[in-house]
Image: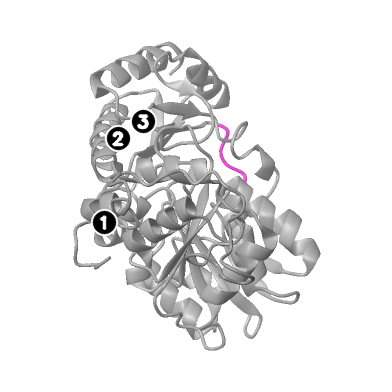
Amino acid sequence: MSDELGFSTRAIHAGQEADATTGAVVPAIYQVSTYKQDGIGGFRGGYEYSRSANPTRAALEECMAALEGGSRGFAFASGLAGQDTVARALLVPGDHVVVPSDAYGGTYRYFNKVAKPQGIDHSIARIGDVEAVRAAIVPGRTKMVWVETPTNPLLGIADIEAIAEVAHDAGAVLVVDNTFATAYLQNPLALGADIVTHSTTKYSGGHSDVVGGAVVTAKEIRVPGLEDAEDRIAFHQNSIGGVAGPFDSWLTLRGLKTLAVRMERHCDNAEKVVEFLQGHDGVSQILYPGLESHPNHDVAARQMKRFGGMVSFRMTRGEDAAVKTCGTVRLWTLGESLGGVESLIEHPARMTHASVAGTELEVPGDLIRLSVGIEDVDDLIADLREALDIHG
């Protein structure tokens, strides 16, 4: 589908043409494992076995590629399954990866506990500092620079265009986890990234009812020797087999149809929550790229359409106050994950990022992370105010 079409048009139509037989406007759920062949090797539409290809998953993959402006999309059973496939497809023992100092705990756990024992080393860099990324590169060995922007949970911002230049100069691919921003707010491939990953569990699905992941490759991989990255990822997706199932693919595809309107509401509500937090004495620091006080606000303003629905803040009275605040709210659901229509609150140090305690990625104990949903924002603020007035 043409990149010239608007985002919502692509979200609703890419890979989702009306069924030629019935006229159904919603893609079918092809809950099938195998397909009848027209003679040995006579595959109908290229389908033989659903690990290799499934029509519902193919529709999702086409839609994700269209939204990111990429060459090809790949759908997985989880975001980490997609990340693992990218790493296995493009890295070999002896290679080196630059990882953010503020990365999702599961991503760091993967590189530290899974990839490292298999001979793939990594260094930690402050991803908001281009020169720190450059300094972390090991000449001749660094084959991948991994970026989250905004980061999880400190909402750091990476200059994608500048880091792409650094990575490519070193002969490394740039992979950007675009989960927090989504393709609606940010397009890493247009800024020079080679590969984009998503946990589609989050904003893409948007309703907290499906777990999934996606990978999208650029139309041109800018690293010599890795021009076949798309084919490598396709081969490993099939060989490893961590693919999205038909129903999960269908749920995610359904979620993408409303991504644009949901993200606008998430952003509207987040901005009002931030405004409230700025006036409360119980809050010592707010981490949100939309604030001019954010160290990389200018970068975020340049490469993002808006600043997203994720907000983190630190409590004046420390960790105990943060924990109690998380347990006192009523409308904000205490839970991990993010990006759903309902608002979530969590304590990263003891929840999503407990696995990085004691490492360079350890997060402050007084930190609270909010996934601001699409409820009436006055109700959300009133609930948060009551908890902060008690514990702040």
372 is higher (above) or lower (below) than 56: above
- Mark 2 or mark 3: which is in front? 3
The residue that label 2 is drawn on is 270
The residue that label 3 is drawn on is 341
Q: Report, in whole angstroms, how far the alpha carbon at label 1 lies from the one at label 2.
A: 26 Å
Tell me the magenta residue range: 361-365
Q: Report, in whole angstroms, how far the alpha carbon at label 3 lies from the one at label 1.
A: 21 Å
Classify the position of the C terminus by image quarter: top left
Q: Position of residue 54 (x, y in %)?
A: 52, 55
Sooner in the amino-acid sequence: mark 1 or mark 2: 1
In the image as oriented, which residue stretches furthest toward the bottom?
A: 224
15 is higher (above) or lower (below) than 203: below
Q: Position of residue 64 (x, y in %)?
A: 39, 57
Q: Is residue 347 visible?
A: yes
Element on which disc 2 rests:
helix
Q: Is 29 within the magenta?
A: no
Classify the position of the N terminus by image quarter: bottom left
